[in-house]
Amino acid sequence: MGVAISNWKLAKAVSESGELGVVSGTGIGVVMISRLMNGDIGGHVRRALGAFPFQEPVRRLLKRYFIPEAPTTPVTYKRPAMWTLEPAASLQELTTMANFAEVFLAKEGHSNPVGINLLEKVQLPILSSIYGAMLAGVDYLLIGAGVPWQIPSVLDGLEHHESVRYRLEVRNVSREDDFRVCFDPRRLFPSIPEGYPRLKRPRFLPIVSSVVLAKSLIRQAKKKIDGFVVETSVAGGHNAPPRGREGTNGNGEVRYGEKDVVDLEKIKELGLPFWVAGGYDDPEEIQRAMEAGATGVQVGTAFAYCEESGMRSDLKDSVLRKVIAEGVEVQTSSRVSPTGFPFKVVQVENTISDSKTYAERERLCDLGMLRQAYKREDGEVGFRCASAPEKQFLAQGGKSEETIGRTCLCNNLLATAGYPQQRKDGYVEPPLLTAGDGLQGLRKFMKPDELNYTAKDVLDYLKG
């Protein structure tokens, strides 16, 4: 659910209705800085941080980023340091506290479960993200966009506040190379006393797109998996690459075929609970999924454009008007994401999907969440992004063809959530919208003559 689209308000609304609300943990540290610099409207961030068990880093954070008055013009947000193999303690603190705050707010005032979604491709902050969510009592951990086989051992350590390590995916390595990022809760937060309560272990649900990947995870993770989310190729955001020969058309749009259809009967044979995602936003589709053995479904697009989501209101209105006029288009781009994974893009004027808006944007990488790790000639790990200036990317060993059509999803998705960065020269970062192929179907959630709908409207419809 993007960067801050499935925010705590949306997750809270869904959980309070008796279903599993899931917050997005991707880039949440940068989001929290933006909220604080926007005046922390409603005082929600400070209220959540007031419940964080270690207050000294909270005081430092507020002193550095909190601005009491909400700005009236676009903000030049302060940016934290980029992640490396040896990240600054302040960056780990920020990430831990941000994930804690998002889960805390989603769980506040009710006793129903809440989950958090992380991307395995964003590996460097994953340990501190999980620990922060666990400190807030998160109930489910969903991880996709990669092969998260290391997560069970991470949970083993973090529930006891022990030091953990995560092996990075690094390009150009030999078999002997082993690069890992480390996270030590007791070193980062020295005030953790001996005998501090053990943390609740969340249920771990990897997001998979094939039976082969599900079987591989069960084997590699030594069966310490609580179930799966099975995502189809019509889901929004990042998709798995196509397995057939369909490939891409002349416009760089990805095509999927029969080989990309997941056999739910074989998923059922694995003996674990599973939820299906991508196209299951109708009671009849839900019924078919349940008859195939699914425990339930995961719905993204319908909630992304509801009132409670974190998407900018003007962007929601623009898309929903297109939905009503039956003029909305979603393309599965093979080029947009610097990860190289296909990515669903809604075609909307004045967003990065607009060729003129794309051409006007000067290439920049100042957040670095989707950078590739690679082994440099000196044997150390470097980081590069195909959305960075081309000269910089090539100097770091990248190939020119990898830069074609790429955009900075980090900045674009922050803009979509209402936190567009204003650069020092006055340029304001444009948004990018994503959705599943069923975006046109949002009309069924709207009442006649109304341009919006709520999370409750979605749930009422899905429950028939």
Image (cartoon, rainbow, N blue to C red):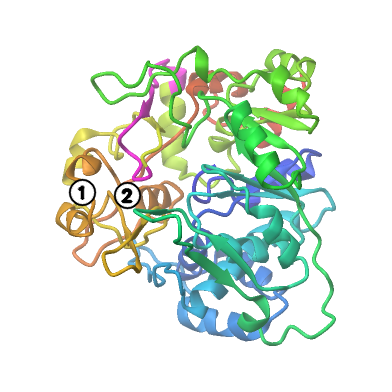
Mark nearer the viewer, 2 or 1: 2
Specify whether 271 is left or right of 439.
Answer: right
Q: Quadrant of the N terminus?
A: top right
Q: Which residue is mark 1?
A: 361
Magenta: main secondary structure: loop
Residue 402, horizontal then vertical, whole percent = 25, 42
Residue 399 in the image: above or below residue 67? above
Q: Residue at horizontal 71%, vertical 30%?
A: 275
State the mark number for residue 408.
2
Q: Are marks 2 and 1 in contact (CB under 8 Å)?
A: yes
Residue 181 in the image: above or below residue 343? below
Q: Is residue 369 magenta?
A: no
Residue 370, horizontal then vertical, whole percent = 40, 53
| N-term-proximal mark, 2 vs 1 | 1
Residue 269 in the image: above or below residue 40? above
Q: Residue at horizontal 50%, vertical 78%?
A: 90
Residue type marked 1: Arg
Q: Which residues are magenta?
A: 323-339
Residue 258, horizontal then vertical, whole percent = 51, 12
Q: Residue at horizontal 45%, vertical 23%?
A: 243
Residue type marked 2: Cys
